[in-house]
Amino acid sequence: MTKTKERYLHDKPLHTIFYEHSSHLGTLLEGLNSLRQKGELLDITLVIEGSLFQAHKAVLSACSDYFRAMFTDNMLEARKNEICLNGITAKGFHQLLEYAYTSHLALNLANVQDVLEAASHVQMVNCIQACSNYLQSQIDLDNCVDIVTIAETYSLGQLRMKVYRFMSGHLLEFSNSSEFYRLTPQQLENLLGYDFPVDCSEADVLSIVLAWFFHTDKRDVDYRLTYAVRIMKYIHFKEITKRKLDSILEKILEERNYEWQILYRIILQQVYVQSNTGKTMDMRLNLLNSRGMEMAVLKIGGFGISGITNEITYCFASKRKWKHLTSIPHVEQCNYGTAVFNNELYIVGGCFNQSLQENIHPFGFKYSPRYNKWSTMSPMKIERCRFSLNVVGDMLYAVGGTSEGDENVTCTCECYNPRLDLWYTIPDMPAHLSQHAGVSSGCRLFISGGIDRDNICNSSVYCYDVNLENWKTCASMLQPRADHVMLSIGKYLYVCGGWTEDIEMRSRLLVDTIDVYDTEKDTWEILTKVPTPRYHAGIVCVENKIYFVGGFHSDAVFDKDTAAIEYYNIENNMWTIEEKYPQDIWEHTCATLYIPKCRDDMEVIPTTESSV
């Protein structure tokens, strides 16, 4: 007897295949919306401000926790066919109903507050987030106070932070508008307390706050003054010079009225309190304002296991996590000059490979961490790589290096005026040098070591006085060095890293000491030995600690120490080993820069196996 077709299929091994149609969700929504438009299977009518909205309970319950509880938790409304909703507008709910049936939400400045109010009331989370995102995209100086008020009313934390960050970033312009004076005392306190970067000095911040207190009628002034102690706690008085603070206080005393006298006493009290706590910002950093900023160590460019890179990463001392900051806006290059001036990073010159040829260029770029933007600067008068770039006073000095000219290694020098964006020629250095080190101390620029035109490693030290515009020879280093770093701390110069030449073997030898130069006595001495001497490490000073980041033992072997980080504490004469950099790196440079503490792209650099 033959098996039936049904029996035969049942005897086959089960093999289930799932089909999914991407258009099904759209078809389902279209079907439900069609039913609503035709008035079919509708089982609930909502009355809002006298307007009637018909819908399906199942659709409303699927989109809203509020309606789900209303229609499923044995509430009185579950048995009704018509419900009156209070506390929201018909205009706002109309958009929510359209969203429930079409997934489209039409927002504009005229309806967004109504939609947000309705969405918050009926607990439609996606619509609340959509309103928040829309308001974030619309923030400007004319509406920021209204938007922050909305954010605080509906507990929209992300929007609230975005608005206060915007106000801070445009504080100078914002304070010149009438909108600024609409801030409530609590909102001004929040603005200062969130500690976001601002576009003006701390003296300007104090002046702006003082103006806010009295830019209102007499009755409101008394109310605002009740917040004076709380608000003044957020002024960073240590960042205001004594001369500037005295000038502001003199203007307060000139007012000769009771309210100003109250503020005067509160300011003096807060100045005293802050003078006995925390650290004073180093005014030599030329930082406009440290609000919302934190000093970070930068790793700039260099080489890794994937080859040359233009990536710049940073690490806050408080968090010890290396994160991506930005990338140099140029084809991958190396051997450029690096300097920091007015808390902006300058990358100038360098070389790159093209068709197996080394191309040296004179172009430069400037990076602003506050705005997270690069800008171009005028090119140097000649192209350079393997040169030194240092800040002396308010100018940048490019010295020596390798160029495309016939002499290759050059003695030429030039200086750059950031304000005018112009380069000027200065007297030539006494020697032709590349791969040397440079550092400033007061009004003097020191140049040490390097490779001369005969490819010989030097121990010579030269000093250029920017006021006298001349060079002089200083006491030579204790031994020749190249590819090293000089750091200026107090009256001393610290020479770190690099290599010297083994004349007999015609090979490179690592220099394993930090040597110190007394700029007043013109003398050298060995300070300490480096536990892990390395070629091409990034070396930088942070609060009297000399950090060595990355580098490798020899030209031939890249070993485990290519990710090592250790630092020498000058004050207690001790070495400390830190957690390694996430990846193997060499031929990079390091610098310190104040970076905003809150960034949207907080991407942590992944750790490679060899750096563990």
Image: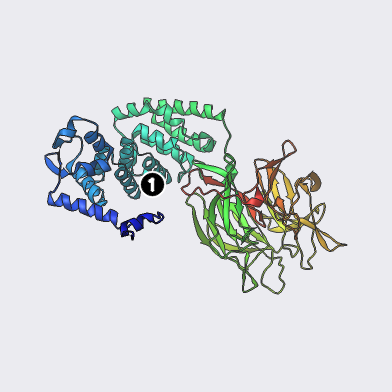
Q: Few, some or many C-alpha atoms within 10 Å of disc 1 (few <14, some 14-19, many ≥20)?
A: some
Q: Position of residue 497 (x, y in %)?
A: 74, 52
Q: Looking at the picture, does residue 140 appear above or below residue 19?
A: above
Q: Residue at x 26, y 50 (%)?
A: 105
Q: Is residue 143 visible?
A: no
Residue sitting at the far front: 1
User: Picture quarter containing residue 412?
Assistant: bottom right
Q: Position of residue 18 (x, y in %)?
A: 37, 55
Return the residue nearer the eye: 42 or 45. 42
Q: Which residue is mark 1?
A: 173
User: Picture quarter containing residue 177?
Assistant: top left
Q: Position of residue 12 (x, y in %)?
A: 39, 56
Element under label 1? Answer: helix
Quadrant where the N terminus is found in the figure: bottom left
Q: Residue at x 45, y 46 (%)?
A: 199
Q: Looking at the picture, does residue 601 appear above or below residue 83?
A: below
Residue type marked 1: Glu
